[in-house]
Amino acid sequence: MIGKTNMRQKLLGGALIALATGALVSGSAHAEVSEETAFVFNTLLFLIGGFLVMLMAAGFAMLEVGFVRTKHAAAICLKNIALYSIAGLMFYLVGYQVMYGGETAYFGIPAIWGPSELASDEVISLETGYAAASDWFFQMVFVATAASIVSGTVAERVKLGSFFLFVVVLTALIYPIQGSWEWGGGWLDAQFGFSDFAGSTLVHSTGGWAALAGAILIGARSGRFGPNATPMVPSSLPLATLGTFILWFGWFGFNGASQLAMGSAADAVAISQIFANTNMAAAAGVVTAYLLSLVLGGGKANLAYCLNGALAGLVSITAEPLTPTIMEAIAIGAVGAVIATFGAKLLEAVRIDDVVGAIPVHLFAGIWGTMAVPITNSDATFFGQAVGVGAIGAFVFGTSFVVWLILKITLGVRLSPDAEVVGGDLSELGAPAGSIFATPEGKA
């Protein structure tokens, strides 16, 4: 994905380059599409990509439910559908304007009560190259993705109310501010040429940094570490596997629609390449994690490693899914899986409790994917990528830590020991997951 100003130039130019790229597709010149036709196809790309990414919310929910213990399942479902809803509201009211304030908008908020571009004649102006509401929708589901990443890490011990307040700040301010530095045409884009095509850093590492801050301040689940540690048995690895497949499927919208244009033959070729690279990076992640789990497990495979290997491959390729060859995409995904697998071991060694492995997958593999961009994209530099990774990491972790700390001091962020024992379903919802229509007293 690129800055909004550059994005509009790209969209407007998409129709004009069809003639020049026609030979690439069939060896003969193609007539350029009309401005209106390009507008329609670009808008459809945003809408289709947006609802595919929205489906990823279900994937995150199923992955998280599968990895937690049964007594927390209903609370996890509520947490995921609520965070998606909060993200949408906050990005509309505040976040969208923060993110697209231009090069000088470090922390500026030009208009906090909703994006003016969603109103009046702007919606049907062909000059933008797309319907404004489609752009907002596509951007909004990315914001929700970052919040979903945090949810998985702090599962089983975070208070719902405190978590929701953190999501408010994350989606209204933290995510949009750092996003404005690159996709909003801000200083990382203008001064350092930082490149993050679909969000290995701006989405995934952002969620990972926020999750890391939360995991440190909230602490581990009771009984997770120490001499009296007890096994934390996942409730349903089949559900976690389903969640992974849903995420994999939705990722085609995540990466593919980040081409931001489908008004020319060149765009169609690019999106096809993105789909192929995205798929193969994930596949390489699974196979690599499987082989690695055999080595680490004395000949026994580990399904959780394989699921996170797929996701790590997807996160790794997200920073640049267009320019690599398929073999390069396979290598990028494989390295991401190795990083995620050993990253999980590292967190265990330092006693940071990450229920679903989101920090190794989204933060560690996200950093790798971002730093790997210059390997295949000559327009990016390792210095520029390092500046982006460092600046965004410092900002997101620092601000998230402060927000979590304020919540911890004021409202508390952790379930009480008794509530943790009985589980989030009973302590937060008053009923287990199997009693959907139960009253707070547990009676039908």
Image: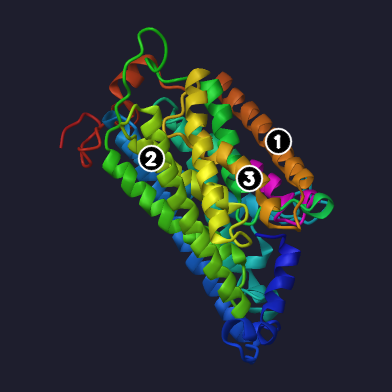
User: Considering the image in quadrants, where does the C terminus appear?
Assistant: top left
Q: Amino acid at mark 3?
A: Thr
Q: Amino acid at mark 2?
A: Tyr
Q: Earlier in the sequence, mark 1 or mark 3?
A: 3
The foreground one among 191 and 165 is: 191
Q: Position of residue 380 (x, y in %)?
A: 75, 54
- The answer, for residue 411, to whether it is visible in the render is no
Q: Earlier in the sequence, mark 1 or mark 2?
A: 2
Q: CA distance from mark 2 to mark 3?
A: 26 Å
Give the class, few, some or many, for how many residues have Cα within 10 Å of label 3's Cα (few <14, many ≥20): many
The residue at 58%/67% (across/down) is 133
Q: Which residue is mark 3?
A: 201
Q: Which residue is mark 2?
A: 290
Left or right of 58 in this view: 37: right
Find numbered disc 2 in the image and state the secondary structure of the residue it sits on.
helix
The verdict on residue 186 being magenta is: yes
Q: Which residue is mark 1?
A: 395
Give the class, few, some or many, for how many residues have Cα within 10 Å of label 2's Cα (few <14, many ≥20): many
Magenta span of residues? 172-188
Q: Amino acid at mark 1?
A: Phe
Find numbered disc 1 in the image and state the secondary structure of the residue it sits on.
helix
Give the class, few, some or many, for how many residues have Cα within 10 Å of label 1's Cα (few <14, many ≥20): some
Q: CA distance from mark 1 to mark 3?
A: 12 Å
The residue at 54%/49% (across/down) is 331
Classify residue 14 by image quadrant.
bottom right
Find numbered disc 3 in the image and state the secondary structure of the residue it sits on.
helix
Residue that sits furthest to the top in the current view: 227
Q: Are marks 1 and 2 in contact (CB under 8 Å)?
A: no
